Image (cartoon, rainbow, N blue to C red):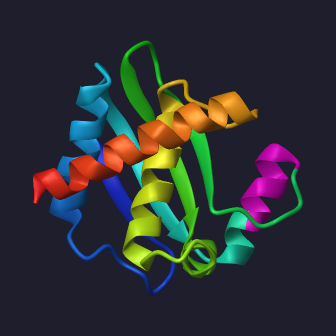
Amino acid sequence: MPLEFIYNTDYTLTDEKLHSAWIKSAIFSENYDLGNIVFAFFNDEEVKKLNKKFLNKDYYTDVISFNETNDKIISGNIAISVDRVKENSKKFKCTFQDEMRRVMIHGLLHFMGYNDQNNEASAKMKKKENEKIKMFHVER
């Protein structure tokens, strides 16, 4: 399956079909093609374990991208902490759903070469996040 959602918590997306169409539109808008992408939703502890195991970082994070993109075919796994998304939505004073979409698109943008390793790159990535989030509302 090219685009898959796996739930390891009690959380589920409200409309997988709508989210799938949005993700595909975001990919195509950057002149990439869809390979195989998995969005996996976890609790804080599970994402922290992944962070330590694969990135040697012993702390909580909202999203980890495991990039398997080959040329212009976007593929990989995106692990999302539902707990962090909830916390971040409160911190940033936005809805849970808006923060979830931001985290989903953030993970996906890493597959397209965007990063947040410094202030300049982070600002560029944030601009792209906002651009792609607006596409979700257009798709409705």
Which image quadrant for residue 131?
Answer: top left
Q: Residue 114 location, x and y as percent?
A: 56, 29
**Image: magenta residue range:** 48-56
Q: Please determine whether, in this image, residue 123 is positioned above or below residue 102.
A: above
The answer, for residue 67, to whether it is visible in the render is no
Q: Please determine whether, in this image, residue 48 is positioned above or below residue 76.
A: below
The structure residue drawn at horizontal position 55% and vertical position 31%, both measured from the top left corner, is 124
The answer, for residue 137, to whether it is visible in the render is yes
The structure residue drawn at horizontal position 64% and vertical position 37%, both measured from the top left corner, is 122
Let me know if residue 60 is in the magenta part.
no
Which quadrant is the C terminus positioned in? bottom left
Q: Nearer the viewer, residue 13 or 37?
A: 13
| Residue at the left extreme of this rendering | 140
| Residue at the bottom extreme of this rendering | 10
Query: Could you tell whether 122 is left or right of 107 in the image?
Result: right
Query: Could you tell whether 137 is left or right of 52 in the image?
Result: left
Q: Residue 120 location, x and y as percent?
A: 68, 29
Q: Main secondary structure of the magenta part?
A: helix
Number of callouts in the render?
0
The structure residue drawn at horizontal position 69% and vertical position 65%, both measured from the top left corner, is 47
Let me know if residue 50 is in the magenta part.
yes
Q: Residue 138 location, x and y as percent?
A: 14, 51
| Residue at the top extreme of this rendering | 71
